[in-house]
Image: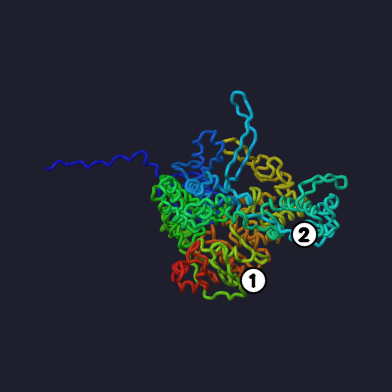
Amino acid sequence: MAPRTKTPQPPAPHAADSHDLIRVHGARENNLKDVSIELPKRRLTVFTGVSGSGKSSLVFATIAAESQRLINETYPAFVQGFMPSQARPDVDVLDGLTTAIIVDQQRMGSDPRSTVGTATDANAMLRILFSRLGKPHIGPPGAFAFNVPSVTASGAITVQRGNKKAEKATFSRTGGMCPRCEGRGSVSDIDLTQLYDDSKSIAEGAFTIPGWKSDSWWTVRIYAESGFLDPNKPIAKFTKREMQDFLYKEPTKVKVEGSTLTFEGLIPKIQKSFLSKDREAMQPHIREFVDRAVTFATCPECEGTRLTEGARSSKIKKISIADACSMEIRDLAEWVRGLGEPSVAPLLEALQQTLDSFVEIGLGYLALDRPSGTLSGGEAQRVKMIRHLGSSLTDVTYVFDEPTIGLHPHDIRRMNDLLLRLRDKGNTVLVVEHKPEAIAIADHVVDLGPGAGTAGGTVCFEGTLDGLRASDTVTGRHLDDRAVLKDEVRKPTGALEIRGATAHNLQDVDVDIPLGVLTVITGVAGSGKSSLVHGSIPAGENVISVDQSPIKGSRRSNPATYTGLLEPIRKAFAKANGVKPALFSANSEGACPTCNGAGVIFTDLGMMASVSSPCEDCEGKRFQASVLDYHLGGRDISEVLAMSVTEAEEFFGSGEAAIPAAHKILDRLADVGLGYLSLGQPLTTLSGGERQRLKLATHMADKGGVYVLDEPTTGLHLADVEQLLGLLDRLVDSGKSVIVIEHHQAVMAHADWIIDLGPGAGHDGGKIVFEGTPAELVADRSTLTGEHLAEYVGE
């Protein structure tokens, strides 16, 4: 018999290989209810659930926040003092974390000097390139920077050497900033005809500025008694000296009826009182005045390039840095590829890689001189992705917040490929997402819910996509929802004519947008949709535009203050209790004196995270104890602010607490799918989609006849899209015209009329490639949108 051989035992697993999971136990951030979950590393996990169910609280506020906090703690205390401080999330155990890179959809800063090129370091590399190869040579890289002004100085300096003596010295630095527009590319001008009627005198009420009445203190008494001009003379007859003082006089102390007051020229006065304020925070009539009175024109000296004449004169192969920055990035990538200069080979290679990443991610249609504040949320997120695409790092956790926002179905496939590529390099990819096409590529799915706000915060399902589909969760039930094409579409009542539109990449477009119906504008990202709608539809009292730009406001602002809901509530509380309405404002007389109405006390601990603790006096309720003794319908004001929109709608709808004005506003908030928001939730915590729907709710009471919406499905769960379609229908049926820029096929299928732009992006787009009903688009299948819509409705 042959001797029996022992089969070798497999080696015991290495201890290092046992860390294949990210473990979360007892997470309680925001609305999370003691969530415990294990996520596989080096896999793609998608988090689903209705808006407000706790996805971002788990992914961003817990996992990613703790990872970043732990990395910051590896630096010396001195360095940490310069870094943003973060508190530890409210969680019992977080184990197996890796370095987290967050790619969110926060809009990039709207600083006028921030461009796509400056935000991605492509401009920095181009400046070095032109300083080395540009002819004629004009100076170092700073000479090509529109953020660096030219400086010259001369004078005496004392040299600390032996016998100290003064020496004459001159200093100069060549910058690329255009001195006229200071690197902004445009100059602002004030239209004087909108400020006053020059046929009248000041005493006759010449001013046409909101709030400037002829009998007010400022407009008559200071002007009349300043001695600089004659208030009874028509402005048109002012002397040159009077006109100079009237418009541009520096702040000067004058005696008026025994009081010392400050006289200031009209232009600086307007700039301080109106133009220095945020436009979004202005009252509607003030905003309308500012839009009329202030004009922005391209800088005549630099022709909008932001650069000095010297920077524009230095060229490489007949191309200046201004020409390079204004090219579409895919064309610039080809130009850089053709340079082949060995002396700057490493620089060319790095620049080439960055530009190719733009093209690969579907942003080849952008130009480097595009202001970063004009990028959509989806474009901004993809721009942030660029620096990570060519990275050699592995075992990193990438966290994405709805990366498919602003993407046409055609582009979503490309985005999916990028996410899979990041995973296949050995990284953990966590994605918060609503689109079925993006959920489909997940290795692991976590569904949170079952509802939103206080009704959410628990894990309803975790497992595979097929398991989710078979589960009885809200997401599982709606995963295969498909909107159907209408049997009949509405007939238009008129048309909004656009003729010869050339904004951005539009190629002399003529189109009639039908009125009285639901019109959807479609096309791939960069095809010219926003240029057509926002750049070509004449803005007027009749057009109400609702976009996703951030709502300006501090943590003291909330849905109740933003929508005007708090005003009737305060008045009702005051009337019911016989006191002043100001007592029921946490920003006014009713505020807790200890925390000034903030509800929390912040303690700054230097380089450590600031600690916020609930105010002990008001217990986080924000109001004085005496104010909480006043009730309406059995509730005090802090309990009302803690209610969700749905609860408040019921509370103020009937009985002792019935307030028709408040109920109307709450109805509109529920209509746009924000029933889960609490009235006192800080605006700073809202997502882009929630912000847009909050704006839509406030504008629904406006008198305008045309509503322009920019991707209203952003951040909406599949189950909520149906509710949004119902809202759009109600707007149209009430006599409004609704124009929607949208990529979601359910909204396309529901439209009465579709206008499709393309065929591609950038200079390959800007044309109308289809006009007609959704059924005609599906039957035609001549465009990318038509193909994807036909696939969606199963035709």
Compared across the picture, whether 597 is left or right of 785 comes to right
Disc 1 secondary structure class: loop
Where is residue 752, by image quadrant? Answer: bottom right
Give the x, y percent position of residue 67: 49, 42
In this orientation, which residue lies closer to the viewer: 771 or 167?
167
Residue at 77% from the left image edge and 59% from the top image edge: 196
Which residue is denoted by mark 1 in the rendering?
735
The label on residue 196 is 2
Judge the density around disc 1: few (<14), some (14-19), many (≥20) Cα neighbours within 10 Å. some
Residue type marked 1 = Gly
Q: Quadrant of residue 795?
A: bottom left
Q: Is residue 224 left or right of residue 707?
A: right
Residue 50 percent coordinates (x, y) = 53, 57
Picture layout, residue 749 above or below residue 690: below
Query: Residue 500: in sight, yes or no?
Result: yes
Instruction: Tell me the quarter of the image containing the N terminus.
Output: top left
Asked if residue 53 can be seen in this view, the reply is no
Q: Assess disc 2: are there few (<14), some (14-19) or many (≥20) residues with their C-alpha within 10 Å of its C-alpha.
A: some
Amino acid of disc 2: Tyr
C-alpha distance separating marks 1 and 2? 37 Å
